[in-house]
Image: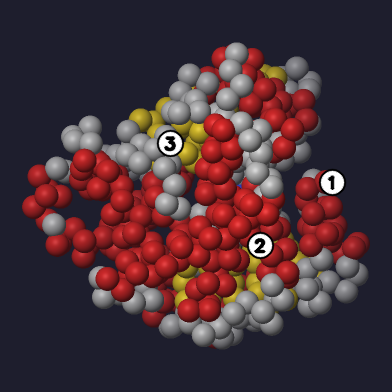
Amino acid sequence: IKENPAEPEFHQAVKEVLDSLRVVVDANEKAFRRDALLERLVNPERQIKFRVPWIDDNGQVHVNTGYRVQFNSAIGPYKGGLRLHPSVNLGIIKFLGFEQIFKNSLTGLPIGGGKGGSNFDPKGKSDREIMAFCQSFMLELYKYVGADTDVPAGDIGTGAREIGYMFGQYKRIRGLFEGVLTGKGLSYGGSLARTEATGYGLLYITEEMLKCNGHNVEGKTVTVSGSGNVAIYAIEKAEQMGAKVVTCSDSDGWVYDSDGIDVAALKEIKEVKRQRLTEYKKYRPNSEYHKGKGVWAVKSDIALPCATQNELDLENAKLLVKNGVIAVCEGANMPTTLEATEYLQANGVLFLPGKAANAGGVATSALEMSQNSERLHWSFEKVDARLKQIMIDLFHNLDAAAKKYGMDHNYVAGANIAGFEKVVDAMTAQGIV
Ligand code: NDP
């Protein structure tokens, strides 16, 4: 904290991980101290910060800040998304990069942890303005990324359109058609099922966890926050599994639809027309739109926070418990505050942290890297089946790690320990670097 003040999200992520790791570190204290393993783990290998100037449609120049934090490459090339949102700062990118190390390790695939982005706000910008920003961003970022070095992907504010503009610019500068980014369009090296992967993966692992605890998704009432990539495909898969999803939200307000969210309408509003959720009522006149926050006050069996960090606090957790929630599974990164997580766990709620629950996105990105390397395209069914198996295996790995250290049902500890063991093993084998 002394070395990196004003990075509260990063401190929060580190505290959660280090608290879980205490048992592992205590068992090997001498080696950890001698090799300064934890000090190396919490210090990024490299952090890059750069200027991104771009010109709007009126000829006005704007200057944003770009970031890429290359956190840990012990088990593979850095991998992690690019967030475009006005709230982005170094602390947020570091928290996301740190989480990414463990998440990527948990997938069982050879990918290290990194994250990047900018405080650029894509909302309300024309396609040309988005392209101008993305090209300027890549004009600097290209120096640090590559198919075997660092392979960024999408995140909040970065979808297929932004990835396309960045890929085009990288190819123009480097003269290389290579898998430097994932989440690409299908016509130029993207993978089928990548768009759906995070949301679908969230439901695959939720179902596995529920099954192991005597429940399932079918017939349950589900609350979802967010209405972006993760939320949309979480809603779609939950409904395919026979659940009823009654909410979604954006940063202005939220929707309650007692008949179940109409996912086709949601896609039309968010993906095709790029509009706000206020439009939803036009498609479903019986639904309700409320300004502000309120999703977690709605009674549900399963809660899936899929918007952003710290959106589910202690008060929300108390409401969820009061309303009888069985499970909370994080689609977003760190959407639940530490106090809320502890409260949910203390009250017997099954809680799956984002680094496990939303790992389906990066896992499928790694499958996109494999397809790019072998210059092949896999079918939707093949990718989806691999994704499902990865999420099932992931749950059993973290469940086993929690049990091994006497913390049965503590899936936060299980995820942190299982992700950590592989990374630390690789770091130790590679010497003091
Ligand atoms: P999108 O940009 O597609 O959607 C984000 C959603 O969250 C929007 O509904 C947005 O509303 C809302 N949101 C964003 N910031 C805020 C805020 N400060 N307050 C309230 N609502 C907000 O992003 P994704 O769906 O891709 O990402 C959602 C979460 O999932 C993030 O935490 C991301 O890191 C995580 N994640 C995403 C993966 C992926 O594959 N896409 C993979 C793993 C994790 P509005 O439109 O009003 O901004």
Label 3: which residue? 78
Q: Residue at x 61, y 57 (%)?
A: 385
**Quick one: SS at disc 2?**
helix
Residue 272 or residue 88, whichever sits in front: 272
**Quick one: SS at disc 1?**
loop
| Mark 2 or mark 1, whichever is nearer to me | 2
Q: Is 235 placed left or right of 111 in the picture?
A: right
Q: Residue at x 53, y 60 (%)?
A: 389
Label 1: which residue? 273
Residue 122 appears in the figure: no
Residue 37 appears in the figure: yes
Q: Position of residue 288 (x, y in %)?
A: 81, 71
Q: Earlier in the sequence, mark 3 or mark 2?
A: 3
Q: Residue at x 80, y 58 (%)?
A: 266
- Name the residue type under label 3: Tyr
Residue 118 or residue 176, whichever sits in front: 176
- Name the residue type under label 2: Ala
Q: Position of residue 188 (x, y in %)?
A: 70, 30
- Give the quadrant of residue 28: bottom left
| Ligand 1 is within 8 Å of the C-beta of the residue at disc 1 | no
Q: Earlier in the sequence, mark 3 or mark 1?
A: 3
Crowding at mark 3 (Cα within 10 Å: few <14, some 14-19, many 20+): many
- Name the residue type under label 1: Lys
Is residue 278 positioned above or below 58 on the image? below
Q: Earlier in the sequence, mark 2 or mark 1?
A: 2
3D distance between C-alphas at marks 3 and 1: 33 Å
